Image (tube, grey):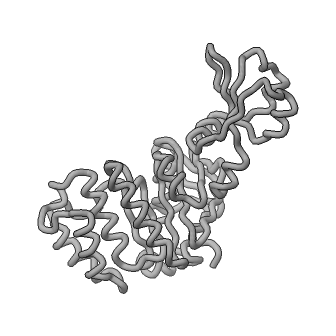
C-alpha cells in the first residue's frame, strides 16, 4: 500500500461552500501537513476522510478501503484529533476512557496512563472544566493510545503553549519510528510544519494548489527583493506573485535561473519560508 489516504474526483457542496473534483493522495509512512487559511476547505476534506461527511461525487479510500464496506475496520485503525472537544463534556477522562477502550482492538491502558501523566491531565475532572489546550491534550492522548496506523488531526496545536508544542513534536517523531504509521494534520502554524512535515499540501477555496515534499518546495521556490523600477510587463513574468510597497518589491519565483539571467545582481535573493510560499502561491492563484 503506497497511499494511506486517497481522494479521487471528490466534490462536496453545502452552506455556500464547495470543493470540486479534488484529487489528493497521501503517502503511507510520512508526516503530511495540510495548510490553508480559515475557510479554505481543510476541515471539510478532513471530515470526508473521516466519513463525517459523504462526498456528492468521487471516491474516498483509507488504507485502500472504502467506507461503504469497511467503515468499522478503517475507524479502528485511525486516531483522530479534532479542533473541538468531541467527547461528553460532563464526563471525566477516567469515564471517557472506559467508553472508548472497547471500541478499539488494540487499546493500551498503560500507554494512555503514560500520556495522561506526561501531559499532566486531570483524570477525574469533567472535560468541560478543562481549558481548550488541555482538551486538545486529552484528544491527543486518546488518539495515540490504540496503536493507530493513521493519525488524523485538525489543528492539533491550537491552544497549546510553545513548550508543549515542542514536546508534541518529539512524540510525533517517536510515533513515526514505526514505519507502518502515518500522520496527516492541518495547521496554520507553519513553523510546526517546517520542523515536522515530510510533505505539504496547500488548499485554497476548496482546491489543492500543490502537494509536494517539503524539500522539493524549498528547492523550487525562492524569494526575490528589488526596487520597483525593475518591474515591467516582461520582467514580472519571472514571478509567481509580487508584493509591492513604497520601498520596493518582494516576490516569489520558481525560476531562479531565469531571475538571475534577467536581473543579475540588481536584486536580493533569499530562501523562501513555508509561510512565504503559502502566501505568494495562494495570491498568485487568485
Residue 93 x, y percent position in the rendering: 19, 68
The one of 60 and 182 positioned closer to us in this rendering: 182
Q: In this view, does 106 lie above or below 142?
A: below
If the image is split into quadrants, where does the C terminus sit?
Answer: top right
Residue 242 x, y percent position in the rendering: 68, 28
Residue 137 x, y percent position in the rendering: 29, 60
Residue 179 appears left or right of 106: right
Residue 70 appears left or right of 104: right
Q: Which residue is drawn at 19% across and 60% down?
A: 127
Q: Find the residue positioned furthest to the right.
A: 261
Residue 171 appears left or right of 55: left
Residue 154 appears left or right of 217: left
The answer to which image quadrant residue 136 occupies is: bottom left
Q: Find the residue positioned furthest to the left.
A: 124
Q: Which residue is drawn at 54% across and 72% down?
A: 62
Q: Which residue is drawn at 67% across and 49% down?
A: 218
The one of 30 and 77 positioned closer to us in this rendering: 30
Q: Find the residue positioned furthest to the front.
A: 265
Answer whether residue 188 is visible to the viewer in this image: yes
Amino acid at each position: 500500500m503506497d497511499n494511506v489516504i486517497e481522494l479521487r474526483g471528490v466534490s462536496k457542496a453545502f452552506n455556500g461552500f464547495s470543493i470540486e473534483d479534488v484529487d489528493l493522495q497521501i503517502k503511507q509512512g510520512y508526516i503530511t501537513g495540510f495548510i490553508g487559511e480559515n475557510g479554505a476547505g481543510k476541515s471539510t476534506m478532513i471530515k470526508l476522510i473521516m466519513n463525517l461527511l459523504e462526498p456528492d461525487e468521487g471516491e474516498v479510500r483509507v488504507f485502500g478501503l472504502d467506507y461503504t464496506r469497511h467503515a468499522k475496520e478503517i475507524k479502528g485503525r485511525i486516531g483522530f484529533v479534532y479542533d473541538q472537544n468531541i467527547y461528553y463534556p460532563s464526563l471525566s477522562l477516567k469515564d471517557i476512557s472506559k467508553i472508548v477502550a472497547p471500541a478499539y482492538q488494540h487499546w493500551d491502558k498503560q500507554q494512555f496512563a503514560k500520556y495522561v501523566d506526561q501531559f499532566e491531565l486531570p483524570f477525574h475532572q469533567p472535560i468541560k472544566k478543562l481549558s481548550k489546550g488541555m482538551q486538545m491534550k486529552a484528544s491527543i492522548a486518546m488518539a495515540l493510545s490504540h496503536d493507530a496506523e493513521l493519525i488524523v488531526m485538525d489543528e492539533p496545536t491550537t491552544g497549546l503553549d510553545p513548550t508543549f508544542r515542542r514536546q508534541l513534536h518529539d512524540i510525533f517523531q517517536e510515533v513515526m519510528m514505526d514505519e507502518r504509521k502515518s500522520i496527516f494534520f492541518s495547521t496554520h502554524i507553519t513553523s510546526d510544519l517546517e520542523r515536522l512535515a515530510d510533505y505539504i499540501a496547500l488548499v485554497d477555496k476548496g482546491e489543492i494548489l500543490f502537494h509536494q515534499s517539503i524539500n522539493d518546495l524549498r528547492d523550487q521556490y525562492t524569494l526575490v527583493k528589488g526596487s520597483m523600477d525593475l518591474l515591467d510587463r516582461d520582467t514580472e513574468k519571472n514571478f509567481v506573485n509580487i508584493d509591492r510597497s513604497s520601498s520596493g518589491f518582494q516576490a516569489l519565483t520558481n525560476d531562479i535561473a531565469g531571475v538571475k539571467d534577467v536581473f543579475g545582481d540588481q536584486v536580493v535573493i533569499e530562501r523562501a519560508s513555508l509561510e512565504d510560499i503559502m502566501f505568494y502561491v495562494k495570491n498568485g492563484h487568485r
